[in-house]
Amino acid sequence: MTQQFYVSPEQLMKDRADFARKGIARGRSVVVLTCREGIALVAENPSPSLHKLSEIYDRIGFAAVGKYNEFESLRQAGIRFADVRGYSYSRDDVSARGLASVYAQSLGSVFTTEGKPFEVELAVAEVGEDPYTDRLYRLNFDGSIADESNYTVMGGQAEIVNEALSRTWNQDADFGSAIRTAVQALSATRTANGSGDGQAPEPLGAGLLEVAVLDRDPLSTRGTVRAFRRINTVELDRLLSSAEGD
Amino acid sequence: MAPRDPAASIHQAPSSSFTDHLALHRPELLPSSRSLGPASNGSAGELAPQGTTIVSLTYAGGVLMAGDRRATMGNMIASRHIKKVFPADNYSVLGIAGTAGLALDMIRLFQVELEHYEKIEGTPMSLDGKSNRLAAMVRSNLPLALQGLAVVPLFAGFDTQRRTGRLFSYDVTGGRYEEYEHHSVGSGSVFARGALKKLWRPNLDEEDAVRVAVESLYDAADDDSATGGPDMVRRLWPVVYVVNSAGNREIPERELQELSRELISRRTAAGLEA
């Protein structure tokens, strides 16, 4: 039997974290932000059918970046967890906090015990009665969990998007302007990695975006308890072009 | 050991059915996994409240379902407020006659089943798919049905592919039958069906369809003691849902109250045995 080389736990964890970070950095970014009308989830995603955003439960949405097969299995597991919980207790007993801590557990145990860590970052958002009761959790590949307020950015060039959002985010925005703000912030990455000749970035078109919202009061506006709603390309086109008319 | 074929594990991937997931991981939560023990000769039904009459009919552009509000236990009225018609998802409704407790559980499970599929797959289930899932659920209840706890649903929905309202009935073995024009289940169904045959006509508009449903339930309540009629004292009216291309809509109580009053006064004026 061959002798195994000794690797210190610090080095092992650092290598795994670097590996996961590299994987995530290759992906396009996702923004989740709260506003007056609810929570908007905006992703740069050219695929019309492989979603990065999803409904988990009545008031809970999900956004992810990284490896598709990995976050897709986490998404499905989250839906199963929420549905079993809501079915065996009550629909009111399903919370983003509970879901986020389950995700943190499984990401953490994969990070430390499996051969390869998940190359994903997740956001779990729960829309509240008012913006102060909105819940926004960001989960890292190692299971670390952050309770964010206002907005969160994940993915390849999160710093650039984060910086753009910190200047433009506004709590009183409606969905239209919140989505436009997010799209502008996501578009900011395009100059950074482009020619860099100081031109204004070409904004992302509706075809390159995946957008969904969590309505604050879906029962009175749509007659359902399910807050999650996808914004289709036509509607998104209209939303984005109305900004240019301003 | 032979090398494992990675593709062979595809069929073991988690399914998009909530019921299958429960059966695998939390079987005790399934309504059908309750066991009554060996001793029985079909008498358990007398111990539990029974829901009664549901009617359903197609009309121009959609389909309608209505149920009375009474549950009985033997010769007693167990509830005057029970609801037996529920939306299953945005484009379908479900009414259940039979053992009330099991029926309500089955409705709840079916609602989660459809929503779960929609969330996992990112697209709603087809109407045929929904009606087949319901058949499987009824079939899994067969052991309990044989002990007297039968549950018989009626399922109606708008088929978004064929652009038409469709209607399905079931038997306790999970047999699924597509019905045309109209159908009724439950103890008062024989009388309701008679009324439906006389009152239904092709291309009813929505308002007339609601009227026909209320009238057929009235006829069922008139002759079947287990079916409740409009309750003027407690202001209880049937539960009526319509499904069309715009989705489900519950007919508001105000309209049903008006319809019921008009119906009663018309019959009062018509004569003694109207």
Image (tube, coloured by chain):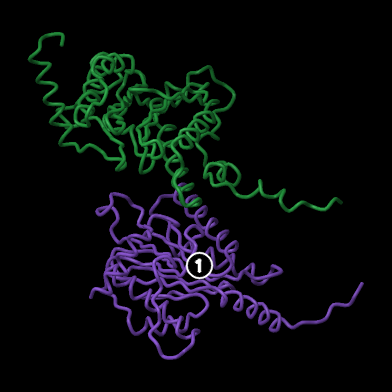
Nearer to the camera, B239 or A28: A28
Q: Residue B222 lies in what quarter of the image?
A: top left
Residue receiving disc 1: A64
Nearer to the camera, B71 or B186: B186
* Colour given to chain B in the rendered image: green
Q: Position of residue B160 (x, y in %)?
A: 38, 40
Q: Is residue B14 above or below residue A45?
A: above
Q: Residue at x 50, y 18 (%)?
A: B42
Amino acid tagged 1: Ala
Q: Residue at x 26, y 16 (%)?
A: B195
Q: Residue A112 lies in what quarter of the image?
A: bottom right
Q: Position of residue A145 (x, y in %)?
A: 51, 73
Please tell me whether mark 1 sits on a helix, a strand or a loop: strand
Q: Is residue A90 above or below residue A54?
A: above
Q: Position of residue A152 (x, y in %)?
A: 42, 75
- Letter of the chain in purple: A
Nearer to the camera, A51 or B262: A51
